[in-house]
Image (tube, coloured by chain):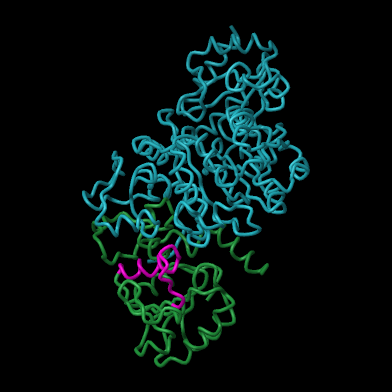
Chain colours: A green, B cyan
Amino acid sequence: MNHDAYPDNYIRGILNSVKSIAMVGASPVNVRPSYFAFKYLAQRGYDMIPVNPGHVGKELLGKPFVASLSDIGRPIDMIDIFRNSSHILPVVEEALTLDPLPKVIWMQLGARDDVAAAKAESVGIKVVMNRCPKIEYGRLSSEISWMGVNSRTLSSKRAPAPTQGMRLSLNRMSVGGGDTAASDRAAKNKSEQS
Amino acid sequence: MSDRLPGFSTLAVHAGAQPDPTTGARATPIYQTTSFVFNDADHAASLFGLQAFGNIYTRIGNPTNAVLEERVAALEGGTAALAVASGHAAQVVVLQQLMQPGDEFIAARKLYGGSINQFTHAFKSFGWNVVWADPDDISSFERAVTPRTKAIFIESIANPAGSITDIEAISTVARKAGVPLIVDNTLASPYLIRPIDHGADIVVHSLTKFLGGHGNSLGGIIVDAGTFDWSTGGKYPMLSEPRPEYHGIKLQETFGNFAFAIACRVLGLRDLGPALSPFNAFMILTGIETLPLRMQKQCDNAKAVAEFLAGHSAVASVSYAGLPSDKYHQLARKYAPKGAGAVFTFSLKGGYDAGVSLVSKLQLFSHLANVGDTRSLVIHPASTTHSQLDDAAKIKSGAGPDVVRLSIGIEDKEDLIADLEQALGA
């Protein structure tokens, strides 16, 4: 997978197929991006599991925190990692010990570890780096257009009137693969410098 | 679901708009409302805390305006956009996110006269200091960079003479200085030039001009290219630091490559207040659907009119980058191969008085202070748009006393030429 520019169909396929998501580094602080994403994905019907050893014994929006991936005790489809790039590898190594393996490992906006990604991909796990699943879901459904964001999708179909907590269709026509050309270039230049 | 790239004209009609979920209305409805109901207290808190996508109040966002925003973002190749009340408002909102009192920004000397006034006088009282550079001498931008420089501002096609700016060369200076390049793309429109493809980090427009295109509605827009890293060096605290207005959210960390557009919305528009009327957004959206058709016709007409004027005995010179003899012709071929725009100037051998006489005799051209209308327009910049500049600044910005500016419309070119011929000859 070219991790500089993901085709929309790759992201769409992941978000349409996974049901359970373990979020590593989920925060109970309601101004942290992980809290935003956790809440949004739960509202869109994903089975969310907060993973954070610092908050075991507490709940995030009604879901009990677990200390680590191995403590979840049931199969999970996707691991969403809210940690800095330097803390990604140990999480991926732990994920690779799970049985069954997760189908997807997703690293948040700003997080990228190509070595960890290659390890996961070598055993057939799909990897997404430096993206936010909330933003991608909002973009492919065009819900994010409320904020003037370029969803890079088009549709001439009437969408169902949105109600609270409903799943939205992500199957709109994509304008182009991945991000906008200019922002992709900038992200690539940045990752080459660091 | 195939991933393919539709053409510019398809985006001009479709981007951002889909049939209304509630009624099935195909044209974008005018959501003429100040406010939007919340589902419950948690929904309200989520919206106010920027945790959920949705509408609160039209000073922060409106569904009609959102269609306009996404459409212009798509046409410019940006990640997101924010529509505001005017092009001037767009400039205030952009710079508010970048500048602290005592900071500097570098601006090309060839700009719309209103921008020169805004930068020189209004911004001075905010402690935002403009440093002028010459777009024909790239090294003047390099020399103007100081540790307090926060941005570089240029026009892609510069008012009033339609000169073409070397965007790539200036973007190299901006990148080296570690500051964003802001390009006012009003006179080109994304149909002719997409500044983001040439290194712009932020694009602004007066929507009032070619995008709206019919001279009936004011508006402005800010497009985020998603290319600039706001986190380095703490230079841009509005984007990189925890915001007390939102309980400590860091906008770049939360919104990634469209954080600048979000900052303009939730820190700029929300607190400064220059919201665009949804009715104006609707009028401008309708205009944008025909942008490719209008812009091409206006460019073709402008070239024909410029060629006619260049051959007329009463005309001293014509500044139009579409003419092969023009100083900016090579830059026009590089940046605007479909046409060099529809705004240009010419000077009359008879000087100031001949300019005044010409304007008074024209029958089709309207004498007014706007550009980018379907109608052809004429103005004498020295006595109007650029009148508040001193004589030296007038000449430097291309608005000397003998200069007349035209904005060519979509009429039949033969009629425009005939009108100029009778006004020049009599």
Image check: B9 left or right of A43?
right
Residue B9: x and y, percent?
Answer: 44, 47
Above or below, B196 against A102 in this view is above
Residue B337: x and y, percent?
Answer: 60, 43
Indicate yes or no whether the magenta region holds residue A39. Answer: yes
Above or below, B377 against B63 in this view is above
Question: Where, quadrant-wise, is the N terminus of chain B in this rendering?
Answer: bottom left
Q: B320 or A121, which is in the foreground?
A: A121
Task: Tally the numbered discs.
Answer: 0
Residue at the far left in the pictured view? B23
Question: Where, quadrant-wise, is the C terminus of chain B in this rendering?
Answer: top right
Above or below, B159 against B56 in this view is above
Residue B343: x and y, percent?
Answer: 57, 29
Residue drawn at (56%, 11%), measured in percent from left and top?
B423
Residue B284: x and y, percent?
Answer: 40, 37
Residue drawn at (41%, 93%), measured in percent from left and top?
A99
- Which segment is the magenta one? A24-44
Residue drawn at (54%, 20%), measured in percent from left and top?
B378
Image check: B135 left or right of B17?
right
Indicate yes or no whether the magenta region holds residue A76. Answer: no
Q: B299 or B347, which is in the foreground?
A: B347
Residue B44 position by quadrant = bottom left
